Amino acid sequence: MSAFLATWFVNVDWADIGWAGVDTLLMLGGSLSLTLLLGLPLGGLLFLTSPGQLHDSPRVYATVSLAVNILRSLPFVILLIAMIPVTVFLTGTSLGVAGSIPSLVAAGIPFFGRLVESALREVDRGIIEASQAMGANTRQIVFGALLAEALPGILAAATVTAIALVSYSALAGVVGGGGLGDLAIRYGYQRFQLDVMFITIVLLLLLVQVLQSIGNRLVLHFSR
């Protein structure tokens, strides 16, 4: 096995691959945690203030929806570059794992928030009306009925968001963001080392498959 690796992957430094993999996982873990934490209330706000919902507010909904649409419409590479001053202010650097997370979060929050809004819309309107008839306030309706009923959809949305963040983290390598994407660009692309490129692609594909598998199992479990 070692002879095979030495023959076919002559340019691959397995230690570098390992550290790049760890960096990718750190980027994903940090950005996904903040995205879920901030994106869930954003999706709830979009849902609650949308037409016909509990706190129907056309002005608030239009303002928040516009901000979400603007951030979602920006290509991630452009967002990375535009956020460099903000990233340096927040983390002290625009490079590595720390320098990538703010941009990943800025891209992930509106993406996840819109998916949460869609998941909440799938909840049967009768559940909300029944909760209101029993005298439940907004907090009780949201936490006791809406989130419980929409949980499988929210978990599916979190899975899609996690996979999107994997692809975003690879793009972060364009500006020295670290991780497997940075390795693929510096060695696989700039130095034309196709074996390095191949290994990084395989590892990213495996990561996506693992995330999708975990997400599917969670959705199936909470759908019962």
Image: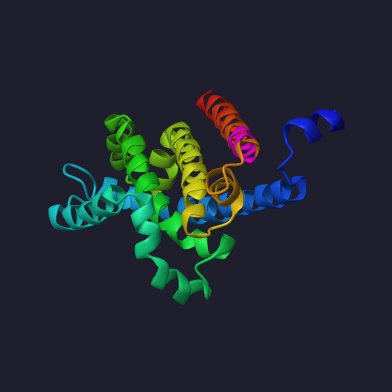
- Stretch in magenta: 196-203
Specify whether 67 is left or right of 175: left
* Residue at x 64%, y 54% (from the top left corner): 23
Magenta: main secondary structure equals helix
Specify whether 168 is left or right of 25: left
Q: Position of residue 114 (x, y in %)?
A: 32, 44
Q: Position of residue 60 (x, y in %)?
A: 19, 58
**Is residue 95 in view from this perspective?**
yes
**Is residue 41 in view from this perspective?**
no
* Residue at x 29%, y 35% (from the top left corner): 121
The number of discs equals 0
Magenta span contains residue 23 = no
* Residue at x 55%, y 27% (from the top left corner): 216
Magenta span contains residue 201 = yes
Specify whether 118 is left or right of 192: left
* Residue at x 52%, y 65% (from the top left corner): 99
The answer to which of 155 and 133 lies nearer the viewer is 155
* Residue furthest right in the image: 2
